[in-house]
Image (cartoon, rainbow, N blue to C red):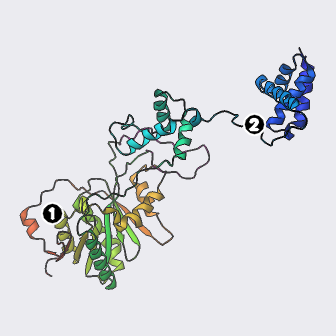
Amino acid sequence: MQDATTVEWIGAKYRGVEPLLNERSRRRWAATEAQSLGWGGITAVSKAIGLTRKTIHAGLRELKAEAADGAAAVRSDCIRRSGAGRKTVTQQQPRLTAVLNGLVEPTARGDPRSPLRWTCLSTSRLATTLGRQGFKVGARKVSALLKQSGYSLQGNRKKREGASHLDRNAQFEYINTTASRFLRRRQPVISVDTKKKELVGNFKNAGREWRPAGQPEEVLVHDFPDPKMRKAIPYGVYDLGRNEGWVSVGIDHDTARFAAATIKRWWIKMGKRRYPKAKELLITADCGGSNSSRTRLWKVALREMADDLRLRLSVCHFPPGTSKWNKIEHRMFCHITRNWRGRPLTSYAAIVQLIGHTTTKTGLRIRSELDDGKYPTREIVTPEQLARVRLRPASFHGEWNYTIVPSGQ
């Protein structure tokens, strides 16, 4: 048995030559040292340099085989003999990739027979399911196999618009032609819509912002609304001709009267100054929501606004299921969301300030105010109120395109 001094001496020698050794020369060097030490040499070398006894024995066998072949034996540049080394997981378990793909594909296609049809396809869950079927594989290897098979982590993408109306494209062309005609005559064209309702309070807000490392802003662990503070309802008006916007932050309900009140406030605070000679206004809006083409209160509220402002109000609605094409969505609302990402919307004042400070390189400017008015739901519109609306439908899809004329014109 070799003593501790011998082990240290072998370790010192090894550290001197280690940078020059590869896998094969390392085990042969260890085998040569073990031979020179005699009995107990294998154990001493194993302790000194960290190679296993099995590896040193392999080196001894190689030395014996080489001696038996003679000095004229042809030397190869291969470090390992052909077929040596640990087999890959897929070599040891040839059906693994096929079974893994079988778990993922039917689930993606909605196959109700898949065992993971109603679960999240995480790598750990896939590894567990494969383990139950007799395979030995971990979550990291599952991730690598999925990437090799052409899979990647992906979110949902809003692409499907449902059933398309026969006159979908024709309506887009009508809106574009009408808007261009208004802008050429220097008449205002606006896009309107309601942004997503926002929780008000110290709640988590999606996204991230730069802060000192390890010091994230702390928010509540739950998203239960504060009964004393309702959700904020941002209703926006985007001026297509001037790249400007207005947002009223409501605190009551998103109704047609709230929508009309926001448009009216925009005209009084911004629009009238920008278009002092305007006689008419074009409003482009979605086909649903508070400004729905089928909502009678929307038309009544517009009639009252037309009388107050002495403006002819022309309205063009986008076809059903095409709200993402509304200009306000990708010219104003997306920038507001980006501006307040990662910040808790702690109060109505904070929401108004964050909206008002939203800008872009293309010159977008937005003004915002809190609207604390009351807008009750389920307001009944009488036949008499509807009859007073001087509505002139367009010849092309009058339910989508119409003009409301103020009284006396």
Give the mark nearer the N terminus: 2 vs 1.
Answer: 2
Between 393 and 16, the one lying in front of the other is 16
Q: What residue sits right under mark 1 in the picture?
A: 296
Q: Residue furthest left?
A: 384
Q: Which mark is residue 182?
A: none
What's the residue at 88%, 20% (across, down)?
41
- Dot 1: within a 10 Å radius of its alpha carbon, few (fewer than 14), some, or many (20 or more) residues? some
Between 176 and 108, the one lying in front of the other is 108
Residue 404 image-quadrant placement: bottom left
The x, y position of residue 241, in whole percent, is 37, 77
What's the residue at 51%, 49% (across, down)?
150
Which residue type carries mark 2? Arg
Pointers 2 and 1 in contact (CB under 8 A)? no
Q: Is residue 107 left or right of residue 22?
A: left
Span of residues in magenta? 203-225
- Dot 2: within a 10 Å radius of its alpha carbon, few (fewer than 14), some, or many (20 or more) residues? few
Would residue 285 be counted in the magenta stretch?
Answer: no
The x, y position of residue 235, in whole percent, is 32, 61
Q: Is residue 375 left or right of residue 119?
A: left
Label 2, secondary structure: give it.
loop
Would residue 217 be counted in the magenta stretch?
Answer: yes
Quadrant location of the N terminus in the rendered image: top right
302 to 220, vertically: above or below: below
Residue 2 image-quadrant placement: top right
Q: How many marks?
A: 2
Quadrant location of the C terminus in the rendered image: bottom left
Would you say the magenta stretch is mainly helix, strand or loop?
loop
Q: Which mark is residue 80?
A: 2
Which residue type carries mark 1? Arg
The x, y position of residue 326, in whole percent, is 33, 66
Between 306 and 207, the one lying in front of the other is 207
Q: Is residue 122 left or right of residue 194?
A: right
